[in-house]
Image (tube, rainbow, N blue to C red):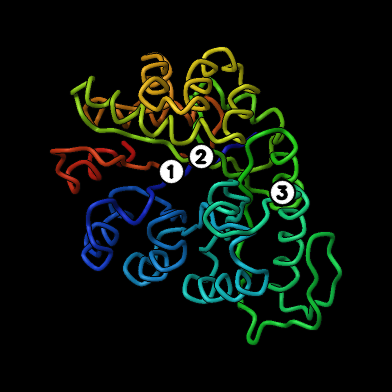
Amino acid sequence: METTQRWGMTIPFHGVPLAGQRDLIAGLAALGYTDAWSAELNGADGFSPLAVASQWAPALRLGTAIVSVYTRAPVALAVSAATLADLAPGSFVMGIGTSSKVAVQQWNGIPFERPYQRSRDMLRFLRAALAGEKVSEEYETFSVDGFRLDPAPAVPPALALAALRPGMVRLAAAEAGIAITNWLAPADVPKVRDVAGPDCELVARIFVCPTTDTDLARTIGRRVIAAYLTVPVYAAFHAWLGRGEIIAPMLAAWEAGDRRGALAAIPDDLVDELVIHGAAEACRERVARYWQTGLNTPVIAILPTPGIDLPDVVRKLAPA
């Protein structure tokens, strides 16, 4: 496989109002970053940061990683994707995914059902709609009757799917061509690559805590690991990666309501595998290891870390 190597940053940056991030985002391409990817959970939405980035940093590829196929209806996703595709023609990736049962069902009151089928159906609908087709279709998980974008984007965006375990990874490879994954160590990438095949672009968010205070970094790392890996889809993902026994004590404590015990049950080695920490330049070199193991696009997410100089960190994390 001839690997296209890209280098992304997660936007918006934590702790700075979006309106105040113009200089940081506008400077990314000159530093060597190729991509800026948003997220959507309980902070900024997935589209607004990319809309301003399209004007501040037109050289960047922009992507959502991800917006949910449940909390946004099919037509809502299509019109938002078309808007971004018009703002960044040829440079926008529409990344979708299921999110989690907590975000979908607990927060939004939407049944978290048939995630594989919902993802497949949404990819097929978006491909047709963004190509300008009139869509009248009874999909397995929803229906659309007589919808057409007006206008459809001149250049339809690429599509990507959030994928953890083999079924979703294969779906992403077959129906989108780009798979977005999360919470991987470099040594995990070949297992995902084997499932995705050689021609699927692999994108992964890489969590970076740029501090030489190891205790602080591990404290921050334990909090974010517990927040994610106790979610059933992530627990199953890491069991598939071979960490079932390692995370079992954390999961047992969490299930019992013992949050402090769950944090204490996360080994230092697991934090060090999944959260990159240390001096920013050393963090950059560790991110580059993902290229060596088969990842196309690492997308750095700078964790909220006390005492850092954000512009300096962004500069030092840029590709060498």
Residue 308 image offset from top left, x and y in percent: 16, 39
Residue located beneath label 1 in the image: 299
The Cα–Cα distance between marks 2 and 1, rounded to whole angstroms, is: 6 Å
Would you say the residues marked 2 and 1 are in contact, meaning their CB atoms lie under 8 Å apart?
A: yes
The Cα–Cα distance between marks 1 and 3, rounded to whole angstroms, is: 24 Å
Would you say the residues marked 1 and 3 are in contact, meaning their CB atoms lie under 8 Å apart?
A: no
User: Which of 38/27 is in front?
Assistant: 38
Residue located beneath label 2 in the image: 204
SS of the residue at dot 1? strand
Residue 115: mark: 3
User: Which of 142/48 is in front?
Assistant: 142
Residue 240 image offset from top left, x and y in percent: 65, 23
Which tag, 2 or 1, sits closer to the chain's start?
2
Question: In the image, what residue occupies the spot 53% across and 25% down?
Answer: 293
Under mark 2, the amino acid is Ala
SS of the residue at dot 2? strand
